[in-house]
Amino acid sequence: MTTTSGHSLKPAAPVSALQVLQVRGACPHDCPDTCALVTTVEDGVAVRVAGNPEHRHTDGALCTKVSRYAERSYHPERLLTPLKRSGPKGSGCFEPVTWDEALDDIAARLKAVAARDPQAILPYSYAGTMGLVQGEAMAARFFHRLGASLLDRTICASAGGEGLVQTLGGKVGMKVEHFARSKLILIWGSNSIGSNLHFWRLAQQAKRDGARLVCIDPRRSETADKCHEHIALRPGTDAALAFALMHQLIEHGWLDQDYIDRHTLGWEGLRERALQWPPERAAEVCGIPVQQIVALARDYGTTRPAAIRLNYGMQRVRGGGNAVRAIACLPALVGAWRDPAGGLLLSTSGYFPARRAALQRPDLLAGRTPRTLNMSTIGDDLLRETSATFGPKVEAVIVYNSNPVAVAPESGKVVQGFARDDLFTVVLEHFQTDTADHADYILPATTQLEHWDIHASYGHTDVLLNRPAIAPVGQARTNTDIFRALAARMGFDDPCFAEDDLALCRTAFDGAVDFETLLAQGYATLPVPEAPFAEGNFPTASGRCEFFSARLVAQGLDGLPDHLPNFEAIGSSTAFPLAMISPPARNFLNSSFVNVTSLRDIEGEPLLEIHADDALARGITSGQMVRVFNQRGEYRCKASVSRRARPGVVNGLGIWWRKLGPFGTNVNQVTSQQLTDMGRGPVFYDCLVEVAALVETS
Ligand SMILES: Nc1nc2c(c(=O)[nH]1)N[C@H]1C(S)=C(S)[C@@H](COP(=O)(O)OP(=O)(O)OC[C@H]3O[C@@H](n4cnc5c(=O)[nH]c(N)nc54)[C@H](O)[C@@H]3O)O[C@H]1N2
Ligand SMILES: Nc1nc2c(c(=O)[nH]1)N[C@H]1C(S)=C(S)[C@@H](COP(=O)(O)OP(=O)(O)OC[C@H]3O[C@@H](n4cnc5c(=O)[nH]c(N)nc54)[C@H](O)[C@@H]3O)O[C@H]1N2
Ligand SMILES: [Mo]
């Protein structure tokens, strides 16, 4: 099959009058793979979404979820018209209204709040689409011009991101394609088969060529099953493991002293700290055999090239930033960066020269400095009154590209906040999610098949362009168009509010990526060196890999990485003895796709994986309904007595829509609003619970 640019028509067969288009696009989802798509459109209807075979990272393959993207876009429950609340707050009762009616009323309500204090208006968004245009372009312009509160977008990766930046100098690392040639791959805090499939294909290639794969994860994931070794450490103990590896590298002289001397900063201090972590101590903290640590250190110290695929699963705990710092020191210690197939990859997003200021226009703040609210503490913040420290009580929230009622921690409070009668809530969505249920207005948004966008990636180094394949479904409008229309009604007349989406796409990488290449082939590859740190050249202030960070000291933090135990470490509570992690279910993407029937059928229902010993102690059998609870709340689901759970740790697979789970709650009913050591991130996987069999009353 050859793909066309999307402008030309390709008849399927000479006898047929059917108009068939192949339209190039990009997967919009929050996933490191950022696949290139080809959508087949017959007479204006998208009939198939496939991976673009010409894009080497995608290689013609998609995950199960996104291959159902057409099913999702034409879903019978897709929102087709603007809706206005017609029942009590949170009841989910709405009636259709016209766009003019909705937009006029929303603008009038926002004007009234803004007249008192625009900071009482809060935008709430994340990565429902990763597109730079339908994400924070026109929306950011709108909120900057308004002077609304700023949002600290921390819900996913800010602890690890900050840890990486403080160590390597940016969200930079190995080029993913080189993992195919590595001889040892540590898959650390990542269920790659579920959440990074195209990396997994490269790891498989390495494995076939003799590489050893080690998975470091409390859960025996699908990925752990397929690795040579699985190290099932306790949640939040990764830094202890990293220090014990360093200890062994030092003891056995497996260091690349030349690389350390020339390209790192702070070795003496780090060495001293590592020597405090003999494998026996780490084994105790991590809950794993000493031998496993010793063997891993030998492999890491003696195999070339050795690579680490770190992912954000390990940084959703109190010490997440420090843990990433400790792990990010390892490749420099053994000189792994010298080879393109050695080093570490957590994120590549720092390689992309996106012109965020040009897209988001912070200059429209015109000297104002609104307060910043953290999206991870939305539960508490919606319940706060006006005060000198907090500023004005939140009176209006505009949600787009996110489903906070399902995904934010301690959702009992999030729900209470969104249920406030005096809160004005607008939700831009594809579907009536748990959050949309709490809206005053729901505005139907276009999907990736229906709009232009442009994408960076955090797992490879190509820019992707997304062309619209079909006309908007129903009366759906693009996020950009909705914010343009609101801007007009608010009287914002800056010419930047008139820019169209194609112009925004051109702006995003103007001067760095040839737009004609993007138009012609759908993607363009950034010029990133094959072994970026072979000769040092880290983008840090010192140009070295910073074991010691003066910038962290200036922030009042420890200059060296350390192991910080979880807020809710195993053994710290007798009432709640089990640690719960809540990693993604393979066929959902955060809370997206939970309402796609074919995918929900694969996942079945919300599950809690529990080890046989822990189940036996509680009289729990597989398939039984259980209560999972702690001081913050309770949710219910089915127990699966499973070898995927290690003793003392239960796995509550996420993230179900509350209303589609039993009892109307999900895992986030029990997670906490504590924040990480760096980056002000959430601690979803730092959570103690108790589990009890639910006694059926029927
Ligand atoms: N199918 C699917 N793919 C996804 C997502 C999804 O929801 N579904 N989510 C996307 C998003 S938003 C992101 S941010 C990315 C990355 O998403 P991540 O959340 O990093 O997803 P995973 O790759 O599943 O990695 C999580 C793994 O970390 C493990 N883990 C939990 N706690 C710890 C710990 O303390 N230490 C260690 N070593 N491991 C731990 C979990 O058991 C799990 O297997 O993936 C994206 N891809
Ligand atoms: N317990 C627990 N909680 C977690 C996690 C966990 O592992 N465990 N993971 C966390 C992580 S890593 C993340 S990134 C967050 C994710 O949290 P969110 O970013 O909120 O992600 P989703 O739940 O996928 O919700 C995105 C919503 O955006 C909508 N959307 C998609 N495209 C568009 C568009 O073009 N326009 C509009 N208007 N809407 C659109 C989708 O329909 C969907 O409802 O969740 C976090 N929450
Ligand atoms: Mo995420």
Image (cartoon, rainbow, N blue to C red):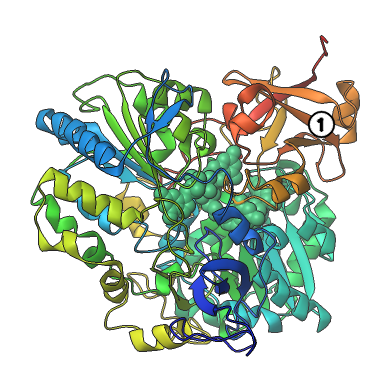
Q: In the rendered image, is residue 311 in sight?
A: no
Along the horizontal axis of the image, is 381 left or right of 105? right
**What is the tally of numbered marks visible in this picture?**
1
Relative image position of residue 367 (x, y in whole percent) = 8, 50
Quadrant assignment, res 211: bottom right
Give the secondary structure at mark 1.
Answer: strand
Relative image position of residue 346 (x, y in whole percent) = 55, 64
Q: What residue type is labelled 1?
A: Ala
Position of residue 137 relative to residue 198, above or below, is above
Viewport quadrant of the C terminus: top right
Q: Name the residue under label 1.
A: 639
Along the horizontal axis of the image, is 384 left or right of 536? left
The front one of 65 and 74 is: 74
At x 58%, y 32%, the residue is 668
Position of residue 10 relative to residue 466, above or below, is below
Along the horizontal axis of the image, is 600 left or right of 558? right
Position of residue 19 relative to residue 149, above or below, is below
Relative image position of residue 633 (x, y in whole percent) = 60, 20
Q: In the rendered image, is residue 49 in sight?
A: yes
